[in-house]
Image (cartoon, rainbow, N blue to C red):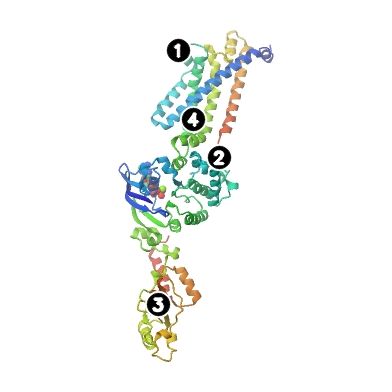
Amino acid sequence: MNIFAYMAQHYQDILFRGLQHIQITLFAIAIALLVGVSVGILISYVKPFKRPVLGFANLIQAIPSIAILGFLVPFLGIGEKPAIFMVVLYSLLPIIKNTATGLASISSETLEAAKGIGMTRFQILLKVRLPLALPVIMAGIRISAVTSVGLVTIAAFIGAGGLGYLIYAGIRTVNTNLILSGAIPACILALAVDWLGGFIEKIVTPKCFKLDK
Amino acid sequence: MLEFQNISKQYDEHVVVSNISFTVEEGELVVLIGPSGCGKTTLLKMINRLIKPTTGDILINGQSIYTQNEVDLRRNIGYVIQQTGLFPHMTVRQNIEIIPKLQKTDKKKIAEKSIQLMEMVGLDPDQFLDRYPFQLSGGQQQRIGVARAFACDPDIILMDEPFSALDPLTRSQLQDELADLQSKVQKTIVFVTHDMNEAIKIADKICLLHEGNIVQYDTVEELMKNPANDYVAGFIGRNRIWSSPEFIRAQDIMITDPISSYAQATTIRCIEKMRMSQVDSLMIVDRQNKLLGVVFAKELQTVKDTHKPVGEVMQTHCPTIPPDMNIVEILELMNEGNSSSIPVVDNEGRLLGLITKSSLLTTLSQQYSNNETEETQ
Ligand SMILES: Nc1ncnc2c1ncn2[C@@H]1O[C@H](COP(=O)(O)OP(=O)(O)OP(=O)(O)O)[C@@H](O)[C@H]1O
Ligand SMILES: [Mg+2]
């Protein structure tokens, strides 16, 4: 049977799995964003934390995702929970790293001016450092978001559902159409997330970086 | 009033500022000047507590800055730096208004103040308030920097080489404007530069630093006329005074013991006196040394009655000048009046000295004799 005909026929199932996929991804990204940006800010203020934290985040990225899932199951069981946990762990590094890099990239003159005219540390963070670092932070989030879409696919392996479910079911039953009806939407989703990320990046980029080139 | 009391700063073993004390009076513009690395910026940043001195204290109006809240202190001190002091992601308006907004000042007041500040620094509010810093020229950015420093109406303003990255023309223009502005607002300003021309142009007082010590702290005029030592003289440039001739005053170049006589003296005696002293004019004074008039040799020789008191033939309406008139004005006056000598009198009319064409010539010729010994700048 033609793949498109197949997908049209099973669109309800695909839609359901797709939405599930989006839901897990969004949830994971939201957590990774909160944790990642906070940790990124923390390590740029508390310098001794910087190396161990980045080292740890790097280490996690080096572990295969399947291995992490296997490791998590005894603690968190199967289903969405370990899946989200794994995606968050993987997404942290780019976000932490870019937050720290973005915050550190602000010229010392600008920071000293901010301090010198009487802004508190918190006001400097909120009004100067974060807005100026936002494009870099956003780039990190975008990388994480795109990888997350792929990672959630793997998470179907431990029963998290999502588009990966279709792929695994297809592999088990040697049904190419079923595999593709999971893989194609997952691909499109990744591209869409990337596009959306780029769009948001553009919006949050302060005007000074856009027009001066 | 801003007082530095025994301020020292040490980084490890390296002494950057050693036991400096000086006072900046209210409404004064003091320039800290000296070669690179002499500690100017270090001293400046101590005032708004960006740098903590190793020892010593700084007082503002008698109160130690260390007894105040750091943030409040800084909000009462304007701060302008060389470049990039503006926040690139904020518009001119946001840059100027940031602190007033954080202080929750009334919105209407803030908006009015911004317009006023823009006018103060000579930029059209309608045109510039909503631009970003990168959409402004370097000179315009620095003007905004100055405007921001004035936003909270601080009593003290600190400027660290604010104009040094600008082209000479813009720099000179901004210096003029700052001097003009300062004459109106009379803030206490501490200004760092390494450019002596800039210092002379804007300063009330100059504090010349060398390796963390004050070499001389004086008014511009004193510094130029009486450099404390060769280092100061060298730094100023020996003939710098000639680029600011308005600092050369009548009292510096006048003949301090002009030949004079009382009004009762006879003309014959006066002619004799002039001949002996080889002068062609005589100052006529009373017992209190008040100037009554002047007589000239040429005129006396036409007087028939040689026993007439000179008081009856002297010119009583000759021009006189005060001791602080500068050489530029004196030259103009001499040109206009076509007189060869002008008496210098104090405000009670007492004769202090005399400026003659030849005394002027002597002063002016020093410029050239000095030039031979001086390195070219
Ligand atoms: N954080 C620091 N640690 C060690 N030494 C420092 C530090 N900051 C400044 N110095 C030293 O202190 C000295 C004075 O520095 P400062 O910035 O006050 O010089 P400056 O007079 O402003 O010079 P310039 O005209 O080049 O700006 C310099 O020798 C500098 O190397
Ligand atoms: Mg400096």
> How far apart are the two marked residues, 2 and 1, measured between alpha carbons?
48 Å
Q: Is residue A144 above or below residue B37?
A: above
Q: Is residue B130 above or below residue A193?
A: below
Give a yes or no on whether discs 1 and 3 share a subunit.
no
Residue that badge 3 annotates: B291
Query: Which label was assigned to residue A75?
Result: 1
Pointer 2 local density, CA inside 10 Å: few below 14, some 14–19, many at least 20: some
Observer able to see residue B92? no
> How far apart are the two marked residues, 1 and 4, measured between alpha carbons?
30 Å
**Residue behind label 3 places its C-beta within 8 angstroms of ligand 1:** no
Question: In which chain is the residue bearing label 1?
Answer: A
Give a yes or no on whether discs 4 and 2 share a subunit.
yes
Secondary structure of the residue carrying numbered label 4: helix
Residue type, numbered disc 4: Asn
Where residue B296 sits, quadrant-wise, is bottom left
Question: In which chain is the residue bearing label 3?
Answer: B
- Nearer to us: label 3 or label 4: 3
Secondary structure of the residue carrying numbered label 2: helix
